[in-house]
Image: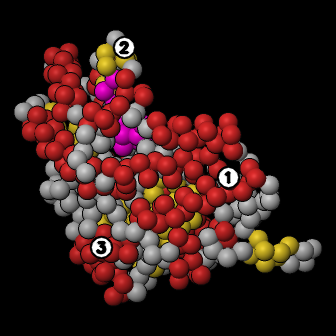
Amino acid sequence: MSFDIARVRADFPILSREVNGHPLTYLDNGASAQKPRVVIDAMTRLYEQDYSNVHRGLHTLSNISTEKYEGTRGIIARFLGAPDEDEIVFTTGTTHGINMVASSWAAPRLEAGDEIVLSIMEHHANIVPWHFLRERQGVVLKWVETDATGALDPEAVLAACGPRTKLIAVTHLSNVTGTVVDVAAISAGAREKGIPVLVDGSQSAVHMPVNVAEIGCDFYAMTGHKTYGPSGSGAIWIRRDRMDEMCPYMGGGDMIREVSRDAVSYNDPPMKFEAGTPGIAATIGLGVALEYIMGLGMENIAAHERRLRDYAQERLAGLNWLQVQGQTPGKAAIFSFTMEGAHAHDLSTVLDKRGIAVRAGTHCAMPFLDHLGVSATARASFAMYNTEEEVDRLISALELCHDLFA
C-alpha cells in the first residue's frame, strides 16, 4: 500500500486550521499527536449510541461497550507483536504502566543495596518511580551515559550490571534526540544474566514497527496519546511469568474474584491489574487509532518519517548558528536545538507567531539535558502527517529567529 500524505492529512481535522494567521504547522508530536477523524467519530458514536459501563451488565449497551473495550486488547497485542492478548494490561499511559511495575513487581522483591540500571536518556516517567524505591527501600540507581555521538551502547548497559542488579529500565527511543536504542541486544544480554528488562516505548511505538517477542524484554509500556489515540489511554505488555510474580497494583472492582469480611481473592491477569471503572471511551479510541495506523502500515509510516528526517537534517545542517543535540545514525525525526542569544522559550514563542508548534524546556528529561550541557532546548518532533513544506516553514521561521536574536 502506498503512503498518500495528502489523504493522511485530510484524515486529521485540526491540520486544516490556522494559528496566528498562518497554517498550523504542528511539530509537537513528541509531546502528543493529533487525532484522526475515525478516532473522534468512534468516541462520539460510543457516547451518543452505545455507552455503558463494561463487565458489569447483561443488558445490550453494556455488552456492546464491553465487546468494543475488550476488543482493543487484541488490537494492542497485534500492534506490539505480543503472543497473548491476556498479557496486555490497560493503563492511562506509559507513566501508569511503569509505576505499576515499580509498585507491583519491583517493590516487593528489591532490598536495600539492590540495583536498577538506567540510561541517562530516560524520561522522568522512567526515573521517578525508581527514585521512589531509592528513597523508600534503599535501592541503588546506576546510570549509563551515551557516547560522544549520543548513542547508547548496549554493551555499556550490560557492563553496568552487577550481582545485585535486579532490573534494567531503558527507553526504546529518546524523546529529546530521537536516538534509537538497541533494546533487543540489551534484552538478550540481560536474559543471559537473569536480569529482567523494562522498555519505555512511548516514542518508539508510533515511529517504528514493534515486536515484543523479537525484542525479548519483560515489560513494554506504550501510551495512547502519542499513537494518535486519546489522552488517558495506554497499555503495558507484561511477560506472563512476570505477571505471575506481581501483586495487585490497585484494589477495587473487576480485579477481584471474591470479597468477604475476612479475605479477598483476586482475578486472573490482566484483570488483576485493572481496578475500577476504566477509561472506556479512551481505550476504545486507542484501539481505533492503532487499527488506523496499522492500516496505513507501520513500515510505510517509518519510511515517510525517514524521508522527513533526512530532509530536515539537511536543512538544519545549513544553519551553522543552530546547535542540534544528538545526531546518531538511524535516529527518529526528533530534533532538539539551541540558538546562542535566545532561550528555548523565546524560540518557541516566535515560532508560534508563525503558526509553528514546537516544545520548549527540559522535555521531562532533566538528567539527560544536564549530561548534554544545556538547560533547555526547543524541540521539533515530526509525525506521519508532516511534510517537507512544513520543514521549510520551520527553517524560514528559525532564520527569522536568528535575525531577531543575533
Q: Residue at x 74, y 75 (%)?
A: 266
Q: In the image, which residues are magenta? A: 24-35
Q: Residues within 10 Å of mark 3 (few under 14, many from 20)?
A: some
According to the picture, the residue beneath numbered tag 3 turns out to be 184
Give the left or right position of residue 373, taking residue 287 as reference.
left
Q: Amino acid at mark 2?
A: Asn
Tell me the amino acid under the disc marked 3: Ala
Residue name at image x 74 percent, y 50 percent: 61
Q: Is residue 80 visible?
A: yes
Looking at this view, is 70 or 259 the one in front? 70
The disc at residue 65 is: 1
Q: Is residue 114 above or below residue 101?
A: below
Name the residue type under label 1.
Ser
Crowd band around label 1 with a 10 angstrom C-alpha radius: few (<14), some (14–19), many (20+):
many
The image's mark for residue 20 is 2
Going 48% across and 40% down the picture, which residue do you hit?
38
